[in-house]
Image (spheres, coloured by chain):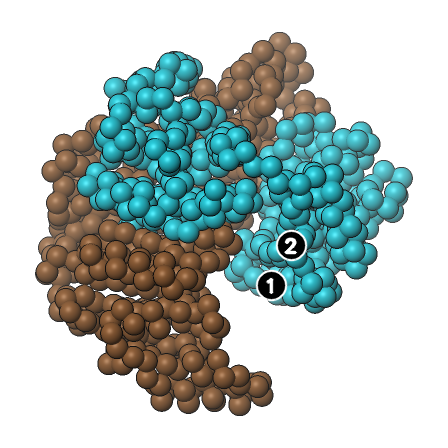
Chain colours: A brown, B cyan
Amino acid sequence: METKAEIIAVGSELLLGQIANTNAQFLSKQLAELGINVYYHTVVGDNTERLKEAVKNAQSRSNIIVFTGGLGPTKDDLTKDTIATILDTELVTDLEAMSYIEDYFSRTKRHMTDNNKKQALVIKGADVLKNEFGMAPGMALTAGDKYYMLLPGPPSEMNPMFLNYGKGWFLEMFGIQEKIISRVLRYFGIGESQLETDIEDLIDSQKNPTIAPLASNGEVTLRLTARHESETAAIQLLNELEEKINKRAGKYFYGYDNTTLQQEFMHKMMERNLTISAAESLTGGLFSEQLTAESGTSKVLMGSIVCYTNEVKSNLLKVAEKTLENDGAVSEQCAIEMAENIRNLTNSDYGISFTGVAGPSMMEGHPVGTVYMAIARRDHPTESHFLQLAGSRDGIRKRTVKYGLHHLLNLLNSH
Amino acid sequence: METKAEIIAVGSELLLGQIANTNAQFLSKQLAELGINVYYHTVVGDNTERLKEAVKNAQSRSNIIVFTGGLGPTKDDLTKDTIATILDTELVTDLEAMSYIEDYFSRTKRHMTDNNKKQALVIKGADVLKNEFGMAPGMALTAGDKYYMLLPGPPSEMNPMFLNYGKGWFLEMFGIQEKIISRVLRYFGIGESQLETDIEDLIDSQKNPTIAPLASNGEVTLRLTARHESETAAIQLLNELEEKINKRAGKYFYGYDNTTLQQEFMHKMMERNLTISAAESLTGGLFSEQLTAESGTSKVLMGSIVCYTNEVKSNLLKVAEKTLENDGAVSEQCAIEMAENIRNLTNSDYGISFTGVAGPSMMEGHPVGTVYMAIARRDHPTESHFLQLAGSRDGIRKRTVKYGLHHLLNLLNSH
């Protein structure tokens, strides 16, 4: 059966922008993993007429409708009443939910009001989904050729309810046997449109596995998703596609799934027992901060000097006065001395430096986005890189650090 | 005119759950402040037929339709083509956008592909909204009795475009007269529930101005919103409420609107022509990184040493060997020497230090979350602070920096 799912979130707080609809994100990811296609998200306020209209709309185009929100005790909570009306059925008290609610109030010695009892009402004939982190139970039911699931709004209640009960209900309903396996490939140093152009034919012919590109924070990811009755076969499909893609784009590939450039870098350094130190002008500590965000850093990062002023560059970091005078702080020569000196001062295996213009104004005649970086190594010649970046101050600094990590990873991979 | 707005986000990445629809949240909040009622959010994938159907649906129930996403260079980006078709008009090249795109590619020396040119196409007759942080321009137009606005998907492009151009377009279109003025009050060092308890009666009786509390990243903010035909009167209402609130909570108040602790600190330091340097162990560069995220830093931050290892603490930062042996790196004495030495080494007015245990494991017998910080000043005794924080590695580091900035601000405010 072709699945066309729609997620309807009910709650005026979403329409006022007080919260983001993270429930739809969570459920979309979960349903995608089950192989259920989500085609629409809808958000509607706590208003019976508009909710009715949204449900009718969903019925006309989807066969699975998942609701979040509107199961609570207040008079604004109208999801289950509305759906019962549309399905021409009624609400009945779920005894288990009722005893849980009564128990909660007696345990916490709080006074139970009448509207709390309303939370134990469920749509007649529905399978009740237990709420282990709140009072309102969820529901799942079929009516006509449609599947309905009602889940509570608070993510702390909704997420475990779906994982523990909702997911199993769908698996059973759809007799899902197929394995769905995803793998994310991460790229840096290539733009989204360039990567898509490079693998256009693969994207155009995608079916199983599918390829979903996404660009964010200067990186591009490809999510490959394969489906097969055999897990081994699904993994094989992913391997084959990955190989095809990386034959073309492999030089920009750096890792899988939720990894980051700094994590990959840290792993490789720890594996080889290598240490690094940094001299940060342009990046102002960002490189060091990102490495120390990972635990175990003290084995890799010896220390760094943030040398925002020329005084600190010459006094602490020992950059030659004549370099600062003749070449300037924003120069290849300055970057090289910074990298070599921080490595020597801390006796590290690697030293990296960043100098340049983050903006908003030009510096020493260089436009915003001018970046020089250098990497010094024990017993190797120092290498330097020039970049001309665009964007905001923040974006320039962040991408500079990524380029630095990318160059370091390339060095580690090539030796 | 009654406003019924709908926000349509276009993008399969939303339906796959790769990202949350934070654009709808941002726009909902913005439109609510303009007095425009948002009744629906819709998310639809990169599919012409389904997008068409979603637009027709929106046309039947809303008079303002704001789109996000689908303005990029790839063939999945089909928002403007689809809307042009529905409105029976065509796309034309916007010369300003085209020259911006060409300029971007020549400046960054990257190769411009044909699909990048597609980004300069706009709907004929639309007002073009400038994209200052990306290549795809936005559009706003009226057709029939409806208002349409097309915005890019990446929040880093969409948010400034709406604030700088989209908002003004709506104000003009609807001749909005009533002034709606918001002011955000920012607090650090007090919990949300404590602050709400302290001003409970004011929250309960709120009407105009309204009070909306929000806690995030260890800070609490109160958003006050006043409406009045006269701007002066609205401001007066805000002033009166702010005074009432800060009579009770003023000691935790540190600034307005989008300011941050580091911005407030930088302003005060610049006003007084003071300089600082930092010795960062626990925080690994985060303090310096946050200061250098602001422009103009080179006048304030002389430099810093990230001293993640004891070798760097003693060799570069000159912490006494016997301190590291007897008191340990996680100690008040070490924090004091770190702060005094970095101040002396860089000849700054202030020196601040951070040492402690970010986790995941104990260190030198101290539990995770143990923090010592010290502030050294020219011609003043050095002061030290002890903190015992809870939470993740990341959370501990971030809150440590905030406490440091808070102590520095208190020092600056009391002298």
Amino acid of disc 1: Ala
Direction from residue A193 to residue A18 in the image, left or right:
right
Residue beneath the point at 56% across and 37% down: B176
Distance (Cα) linking label 2 and label 1? 33 Å
Q: Which mark is residue B210?
A: 2
Looking at the rendering, which quadrant does residue B129 occupy? top left
What residue is drawn where x is 25% and y is 59%?
A56
Q: Quadrant of the C terminus of chain B?
A: top right
The quadrant in which residue A200 appears is: top left
Of residues A295 and A34, the one nearer the viewer is A34
Query: Quick one: A314 or A189, which is closer to the camera?
Result: A189
Residue B120 lies in what quarter of the image? top left
Q: Residues within 10 Å of mark 2 (few under 14, many from 20)?
A: some
Question: In the image, residue A283 lies at what x, y percent?
Answer: 56, 32
**Local crowd at mark 1 within 10 Å, few (<14), some, or many (≥20)?**
some
Q: Amino acid at mark 2?
A: Thr
Which label sits on residue B381? none
Q: Residue at x 34, y 48 (%)?
A: B61
Query: Is label 2 in a helix, a strand or a loop?
Result: strand
Indicate left or right for A285 with B31 as reference: right
Q: Look at discs 2 and 1 and give the one toward the viewer.
A: 2
Q: Residue at x 49, y 52 (%)?
A: A16
**What secondary structure is found at the residue carrying circle 1?**
loop
- The tally of labels here is 2
Q: Position of residue B2 (x, y in %)?
A: 46, 45
Q: Position of residue B255 (x, y in %)?
A: 71, 45
Spot occupied by residue B367 in the image (x, y as percentages of width and height): 61, 65
Name the residue carrying label 1. Answer: B390
